[in-house]
Image (spheres, rainbow, N blue to C red):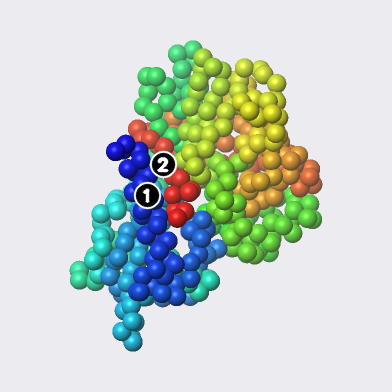
Amino acid sequence: MNKHFSRANLNLQKKTLIKAILLGASVFVSSFAFVPSGQAHHPVAAKFDPSKEKSLMGVVSFVDWSNPHAHIFLNVTNSDGKVQNWAVELESPVLLKKAGWSENALKPGDHVNVTGILARNGTRQLWSEKLTLTGTGRQVFTMKDIAPRPLLNQRPTPRWPDGRVALGGTNTSIDGYWSFPSAMVLTEDGSNVQADDYGQLNSVTDAAKVAPFQDWALALFKHRQERMLQDDPMYLHCKPPGGPRQFQSNLGIKLLEDRPGDRVFVLMGGGNHNYRIIYLDGREQSGQVTGDDDNPLYFGRSVGYWEDDVLVVNTTDFNEDFWMSNGGLPHTSQLVLNERFSRPDLDTLHYEVTIEDLGAYTRNWKASWDLRWVGGEELPVHFCQDNRP
C-alpha cells in the first residue's frame, strides 16, 4: 500500500474516532455536544472561560497529538457511577515539543488529575496547563519558558560574498529562522497598551490608543475584542496571516533569499506553511502570481529594493478576508504596507512597518519590533486543518 495513502488513511481513522467520541457514538459519552474543531485553536479566552475552573480525575482514552492543539480524551467517573468522556485541550504540539514532551509521554490507560478552565458553551471541554499522573504526581505536558537566553555579546551581521546583508542563512553559514518577536500585538509605536499574546487587550477601554482609527474601524475593533477574538478567520477558516501578523507569530518565519531570481521568499511557520514573495527585479506591481489575474491577495503584491543595508518593501492589493493582526485590527482594500527589514547583528531582525489605509485610519502610522535568530533549526511545521475531523 502506498505510504502516503496509509498515512492519510490513518489520519482519517483518527479524525473519525475523535468525531465519534465528541458526537456521543460511545455509550460513555452520550449527550456530549459536538463543537466543530475548527475552533479548537482559538485564543484561549475565546473558547474557554477563565472564571470557571474545574478539576478532573480520570483515565486517558485517547491522545490526539495534532496541530494546532493537542487533545487528551479522558474517561471520568461521576459520583453516580456514570462515565463521561472529556476533551482536554492543550498547547500546540510544536510548543510542547520545544518544552521537551512527546505524544508518548501520556498513553491510553494512564490515570491523571487535570485542572483547567471550562468551555464557554457548556460542553465537556477543558483547557488545561496542569496535568499530573495520579500515582506518582509527576506533571506531564507542562509548559516551560522557551524564550532564548539573553545575548552575552553582539555577533556581527552575516553578509554574502558581495557584501550584501544576509537576511537568513547563506551558503557558508548555519541556516535557521526568525522567532520570538518582541511584540505579539500590532500597536502604534509610542502607545502604551497592555494585551496578551493573542492580541486580547487587558482593557477594551484602551482600544482607541492602539492606532488612529476611523470611527467605524474603532467600533469594529472593539466588537472583535469584546467577543474575545472568536471571529478570527485565521482560526475559524484557516485563512492566511496576511499583513504584519506574519511577523508576530511565536512559530516564526524564514527569509529565504533567491539571489539569482532577484526575490525573497517569506516562509511562515504559522497558518498552513503559507508564503509570500518579495520581488526585487523591478517588475510592475500587478499580476505577479500565476493565475492571479490581478485579483486582490491575502499577502498582496510585494516589490522591494535595497537601501544600503535595509530591504525596503512596498505591498499593495490586499483583499479584506483576513485579520492583519493578532488582535483583529481592521483594514480595507486601500491598505498599503511599507516595510523595512534590517539585521543590525547576527541574532536580530528589526522589522518596521508603516501602515497606509485611509479607508480605516485617519492617518498613516508606524509600528516596529525585533525578532530573534534561531540557528541550526528548521521552521516548525504547523497546519491549521489538522484538528478538523
Q: Residue furthest left?
A: 136
Chain-order first, disc 2 or disc 1: 1
Q: Gap in Å between the C-alphas at discs 2 and 1?
A: 16 Å
Amino acid type for the residue under numbered disc 2:
Val
Task: From the viewer's perspective, tell me whether residue 150 is left or right of residue 231.
Answer: left
Residue 264: give x, y in percent of width and height: 54, 25
Label 1, secondary structure: give it: helix
* Quadrant hosting residue 148: top left
Q: Which residue is mark 2?
A: 381
- The percent position of residue 244, horizontal first and vertical second, equals 60, 41
Q: Residues within 10 Å of mark 2 (few under 14, many from 20)?
A: some
Q: Are marks 2 and 1 in contact (CB under 8 Å)?
A: no
Front position in the image: 113 or 311? 113
Disc 1 marks which amino acid? Answer: Asn
Quarter in which the N terminus is drawn? top left
Between 234 and 224, the one nearer to me in the picture = 234
Q: Residue at x 31, y 61 (%)?
A: 62
Quadrant, the C terminus = bottom left
Which is more foreground, mark 2 or mark 1? 1
Mark 2 lies on a secondary structure that is loop
Q: Residue furthest top?
A: 162
Check disc 1 and report the residue beneath it: 11
